[in-house]
Image (cartoon, coloured by chain):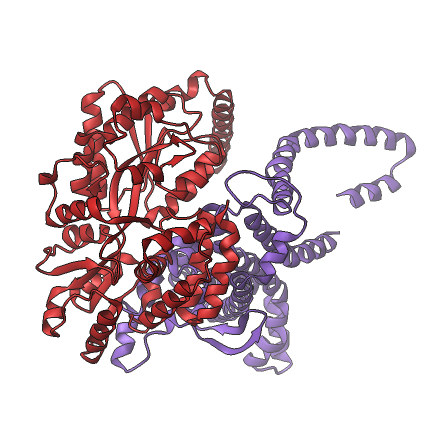
Chain colours: A purple, B red
Amino acid sequence: MEPSITKQETVVLPAARARKKKKMTADRLLAFSFILPSIVLVAIFVYGFIGWTGYVSLSNWNTLVPDFSFAGLKNYIFLFQDFRFQADLRNTLIFTILFIAVVAIVGQLLAIFLDQKIRGESIFRNIFFFPMALSFVVTGVVWQWLLNPTTGVNLFLKKFGLESMWYTDTNILAGFKVGKIEFGVPVAIIAVVIAAVWQMTGFSLAMYLAGLRAIPEELKEAARMDGASEFTIYRKVIIPLLKPITVSVIIIMAHISLKIFDLIYAMTGPGANFVTDVPGVYMFEATFRGNYYANGAAIAIIMLLSVAIFIVPYLISSRKGES
Amino acid sequence: MKKKLILALSLLLAFSMALAGCSDSSSGGKTEGGSKGKEDKLEIFSWWTGAGEEDGLKALLKLFKEKNPDIPVQNAAVAGGAGTNAKAVLASRMQGDDPPATFQVHGGAELNSGWVAAGKMEPLNDLYENEGWKDKFPQSLIDMVSKDGSIYSVPVNIHRGNVLWYNKKVFADNGITPPKTFDEFFAAADKLKKAGVTPLALGDKEPWTATMLFEDILLGTIGVENYTKLWTGEVPLDDPGVVEAAETFKKMLSYINDDHSSRNWQDAAQMVGKGEAAMNVMGDWAKGYFVNDLKLKTNEDFGYITTPGTENSFMVITDTFGLPKGVKNPDDVKKFLSVLGSVEGQDAFNPLKGSIPARTDADQSKYDEYGKQTIADFGKAELAASLAHGSAAPEGFVTKVNQAINIFVTQKEVKQFVDSLKAASGDLKK
């Protein structure tokens, strides 16, 4: 907004500029007074409480009795040495990678299929998009019944002699020891990935479909004139043009998966040996069950920072894009 | 048309924000008119929402209404096994100085080193004096709800934690008698395993069930006296007895169902009910589940015995209600507590809940055969406080034990487990 104002200022005459400037101030004052309430509320209820959480995370408040004496980084050091938190970091990382990759790829493929001007496109679109309308808690409960070793799809698989215990498997694929834990892909987290993908793929599908529709027909036409096959058009023209969409999908999915709580809480819980535990669940149990308020606050701050790693560069680059 | 809709929506939004602002300011004013209706209601906070227990609570509230028709009551129960969700809700309400009129809390550390230590509870000595309760409740039970000579809550029921439930038919088919010792238990388990039946059902999706199994093994291994001393620090947590109990626990874990981590306690009890598994260790609320939900008959379809080595011990889980500081109607709360502690109140609640009364002079004829036997046992057995249910040690320690147990159930590393118990012992003093 500001750059455009200065541009205008350079072309108007000095007398007119004074008038214009005054008018702008009045305008801006009005605009400012409109957003003032939300600035104040956001300052208190978002940034104020983030600051408060940060303050608590540096205190000794680990019982029901508040104790705000300064503890330094004690809570953070405890967490990084804690088996459960190390497992949480592993699970979040693996879950995030698998979840984003599958959602982006499957969403893109479905969008491309739907873009082939097939019959009943809107029906399919709605079917794919529908899970988005559900809450993660509902998804968690439904998939828990579907994937549970004693009910649902596993009874069916058992008939074909397939192993049915993967849902509660505590093995770590491709594991090697890091710190107190075994690092690798926990088998049980795959169940959670399936449920999360089922819910969120519709969203990435919708984004990709919008992106595909925004690509001008002329570009494809030109490529065809140059003798490119349909496959090459997708590989060389369309998919590169969808890159901004892919970035948005990754950012949105990353902030969902890094903060995930409800799906895991409803579906598997922390799991045996914490194979499906995530920081959100640990934070809840530490704070509200164990009364470790400072530890819980430290987990919250770590989660905030991990999301910030994704969001802040995106915000900066999108600001640059605007100007 | 569309514009009108947007206008209507934005008006609605503005209106609701204004409303939110109003309610905020009135609750800030505390004694002002807006929130008066809420203050007058006696809010009873518990986690009794399951079959049986909810009926018990309703019977109790009905009795209270008959005696005090002018006091409106509100049942503010929060669902979730063993109060896991309710405790979280309660913690945030108490921290926000918005306590319910009275709330369910396990006697012992959960009360004493939790809410009492935080200065959130009023002593109830005068109520005990007026009602003449001091010789009506067992002294060891009053001790569990007292700190430094002040009594802080009224026990309403007693559950027993050290019970082994078994499927009668499965036992008969395999020629097994209920095991009294660990040796008998493992002999039976081997026999059952060979016959293709899961010997022991466990459902530790919520880890407190595995903690319960461990505390019962611990009690059976080192006895009530040393078990109690563990939580006061007189016996260290790396005591040879604890190591031995952990070894037994490890051995027992080789007889459980594979899908234990996707089951909750009801699912595990159901395995015994259906005959898929032979035994299950659970508190005696499982009896209510067998009888009310699965429609099974006591001593016909399922049987019960104390867990190995705990024949003369009683793992106590007691639900109590106290008076939080800062409630607007303490006199009404005390009226409720006096109904709760009366013979009539306890006998209205407990037969439905499937627990036994905390008072020693309750009417035994109202209880079923399991209840009668448990009342008799309660009178003569040595009492031990449950760790898994927060009676033995502070909630922070229990949370850490639950985590250590969750890891142990999978890794089965005894040394590492005992080390993490020892490491957590710093949280015992809080």
Identify whether A160 is placed above or below B153: below
Q: Would residue A29 appear left or right of B63 to someone viewing this image?
A: right
> Residue B243 placed where, x, y %?
41, 66
Q: Position of residue B204 (x, y in %)?
A: 34, 61
Quadrant of the image occupied by residue B88 = top left
Q: Residue furthest right?
A: A14
Q: Quadrant of residue A152?
A: bottom left
The residue under the point 34% across, 50% down is B386
**Residue lying at 62% horizontally and 79% vertically, measured from the top left:** A225
- Decide which of B189, A163 is in the foreground and name it: B189
Residue A115 % position (x, y): 49, 68
Compared with A229, A25 (above or below) is above
Q: Quadrant of the N terminus of chain A?
A: top right
Side of A306 where B395 appears, left or right? left
Pick the front one: A149 or A210: A149
Q: Where residue A30 sits: x, y (%)?
A: 70, 28
**Picture layout, residue B121 above or below residue B383:** above
Nearer the observer, B116 or A121: B116
Whether residue A214 is visible to the viewer of this picture, yes or no, is: no
Asked whether the viewer can see residue B237, the reply is: yes
